[in-house]
Image (tube, rainbow, N blue to C red):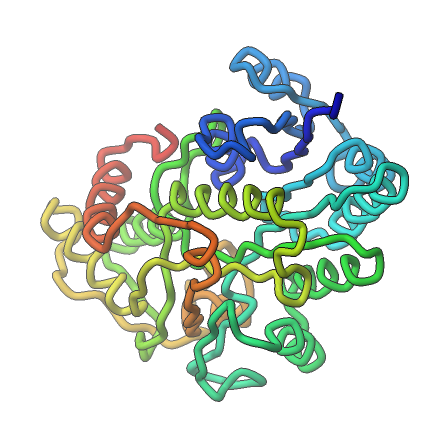
Amino acid sequence: MASQTSLLLLGATGFIGGTVLTQLKTSELKEVKSLAVTALVRKQGQADLLRDKGVDAVVLPGGLDDTEGLANLASQHDVVVQAAYGYHPASAEALISGLARRQKERGGSPFYVQVSGTTSFAESDLSGGAGREGRGFSDKDEGLYEYEVAREEELSYVQRALDVRVVRAGEELGVRTYLVVPPHVYGRGTGYFNRASQIIPFMAKNALQAGKVEYILPGTSRYGYVHVEDLATLFEVTIARALEDPGLAARRRGYFFANTGEYTWFELAEAITRAGHELGALSSAEPAPVELGSPGVKPWGVDDAMTERVFASSAITRAERGYEIGWRPSKTEEDWKTWIPEEFGVIYRGGSVEE
């Protein structure tokens, strides 16, 4: 009798990973419904809570730094999903090596799925750089991996470096790897721990402190968005199709973009300003332009390079492969537009974006 296919999920306590866990546990796709899902966490209390909810969990106190422990755990599973923004290449390589060990010992075609992000493909509207040609990207394009390698050679970026090492490890060890590459992820998560997104709450809190919504000139940079629940369904269908079809293009051809719409940074600042002004929280009805490098323009305390990469760059991507394998996002442009004032209102009233 064949043993049950097993999946190890990292990131189950996070915004994205928690929502992915919920999607996997409630899936109606036959390939996913039959999976034995185990969540990897760092704390016993987290494992206890998940078990109380009917989710198998294993504790690895050393977390991503325990590469030997990660490799051993991966070798006990058929699928590994890293759904947390760990930016930790050594852990990814350890997990892939564990899957390679399982493949050698038991055969089959285990695979690895890693969350990434479209900032790896972002092109600055200010300083230019290797990507200054301004072209957009489809996940059906040839040469996405080679493009990332070329960008890394000019200027390394931790997330892009992770992408490169994941693909490289998969090729060297003969393990299928897939990169799920979302843009700005919005919405309320459905997991048991962190349910909050980052960018809109961050901008709203800054606006309430400063009395205005700031955006970096010229504000024309374009970025994509996807609701966290739609992102979770992309993970779901990718896993299902990879289980069903061991020939599903992987590694250099294993990119899945996830955007369902686009905005400019000025448009987002304008929408947040409108929400705050209508609530009486902001006196100005217009967002305030600022220059990169101005005092106080330090999101999350990072340097100008990271600020530019996130808030003054364009990441234009087209999600096509997901649709071809059955992804059907349900959230619309209206959901995105409605979410902005809803989220601002929660923050203004002193509520928790976790709820």
- Residue in the foreground of this view, choosing between 312 and 250: 250
- Residue in the foreground of this view, choosing between 105 and 197: 105
Quarter placement of the N terminus: top right
Task: Give residue 234's position: percent from left, percent from top.
Answer: 47, 48
Q: How many marks?
A: 0
Task: Give residue 334's position: percent from left, percent from top.
Answer: 19, 52
Along the horizontal axis of the image, is 128 left or right of 162? left
In the depicted structure, whether residue 273 falls above or below residue 15: below
Quarter placement of the C terminus: top left
Task: Give residue 175's position: percent from left, percent from top.
Answer: 77, 53
Along the horizontal axis of the image, is 203 left or right of 137? left
Q: Residue furthest front?
A: 1
Q: Residue furthest right?
A: 105
- Residue in the foreground of this view, choosing between 210 and 119: 119
- Residue in the foreground of this view, choosing between 85 and 236: 236
In the depicted structure, whether residue 41 falls above or below residue 218: above
Task: Give residue 268's position: percent from left, percent from top.
Answer: 27, 61
What residue is shown at x 28% (from left), y 33% (from top)? Answer: 350
> Would you identify the image quadrant in which residue 79 lies?
top right
Q: Residue furthest bottom?
A: 133
> Would you identify the image quadrant in which residue 286 lies?
bottom left
What residue is shown at x 78% (from left), y 48% (from top)? Answer: 96
What residue is shown at x 41% (from left), y 68% (from top)? Answer: 318
